Image: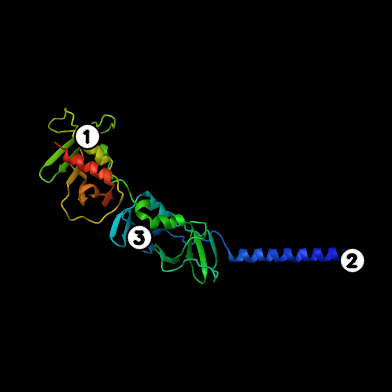
Amino acid sequence: MRALQLHVVLALAALLATVGVRRRADDTRRITEGERLVDCAVRAAELRADRVVRVEASGGEVAVGIRGDAAVSFVGGRAAEELLADLSELAALRTFEANDSADYGLDDARLRIECAERTEEWSLGASPPGSADRYLGGSEGVVHLIDGALVRALEEAEVRLMRRALHDFEESAVARVRVALPERTVELEQRFGDDPRRRRWVDPDEPGARAPAFDRLMGTERNLRAEAGAEAVDSEPLATMVFLDDDEEPLGSLDLHSVGAGPGALYVVRTDDIGWVRVPRSTGRAFARALERLP
């Protein structure tokens, strides 16, 4: 009897093990990892949700456009270039058959990837519980899970993708700056531009005299960084700065605008290299005050 019982137990154990192997094999068939979703050079990526965010390689730069309550555009920085490169090799963390009873959040949001030879588009879903990754709805009931950082870069484009530097040129390349104020024009000349420790800005008519107001102005301009995209401003600028090289050729220009008044005023700049952007209120205010104190 004991031998029979032992035989039955061993037979049941073998059966359960076989079922487990089959179940794992079935799961492996339904769930795959690393499936390549894009294998071409991406020239544009577009997210359509509460607003439309488009990142597009154009003319050697990456342009970022946002359409929502307001339309803004700006030049993307290195992070925008890296995003398009990463999307060119987009692979799913997992791909599996959708469960009819599960909610993946696949509603109206769409992710669109454009290459020269073709375009891919998916419905964009939510994140799994306890994860920041995102679901993509594929064809024929297939769901992909992708790295959520790629989607967040598009959702938070102003913070994550914007180029911060206002100019392509270095300050050391600037010989003179012409500052056009509403009622007068001031010229600054740079001395010892190749040595940041000795660099100073002076009056061209008195190159040997120190000009703290000029140094202060250029120091505050140096601290300006793009904070967010901005719409074009129709009002006259508080000042226009033109940057000239040793041959008096223009390297670029900057317009400063104030939107609003008082402590809550916003500061918007336009440069030749980055277009219209908003700068942080604190640095914009410091720059405006430095302009007011020019002799």
Point 72% across, 65% down: residue: 18
> Seen in the image, is 281 located left or right of residue 31?
left
Neighbours of disc 3 within 10 Å: few (<14), some (14-19), many (20+): many
Q: Is residue 148 above or below residue 212?
A: below
> Seen in the image, is 171 located left or right of residue 99?
left
Whether residue 236 is visible, yes or no, is yes
Point 27% across, 54% down: residue: 230
- Where residue 141 appears, as percent x and y from the top left, is 52, 71
Report the front residue among 144 and 287: 287
Neighbours of disc 1 within 10 Å: few (<14), some (14-19), many (20+): some
Q: Is residue 198 above or below residue 220?
A: above
> Seen in the image, is 258 located left or right of residue 155?
left
Query: Label 1 belongs to which residue?
Result: 215
Neighbours of disc 2 within 10 Å: few (<14), some (14-19), many (20+): few
Q: Marks 1 and 2, how far apart in space?
A: 101 Å
Point 20% across, 55% down: residue: 233
- Where residue 228 appears, as percent x and y from the top left, is 31, 52
Assign the N terminus to one quadrant of the image. Answer: bottom right
Identified by mark 2, the residue type is Met
> Seen in the image, is 280 located left or right of residue 294?
right
Q: Quadrant of residue 121?
A: bottom left
Q: Marks 2 and 3, how far apart in space?
A: 75 Å
Discs 2, 3 touching: Cβ within 8 Å = no
Query: Label 2 belongs to which residue?
Result: 1
Query: Label 3 belongs to which residue?
Result: 54
| Label located before the other in sequence (2 or 3) | 2
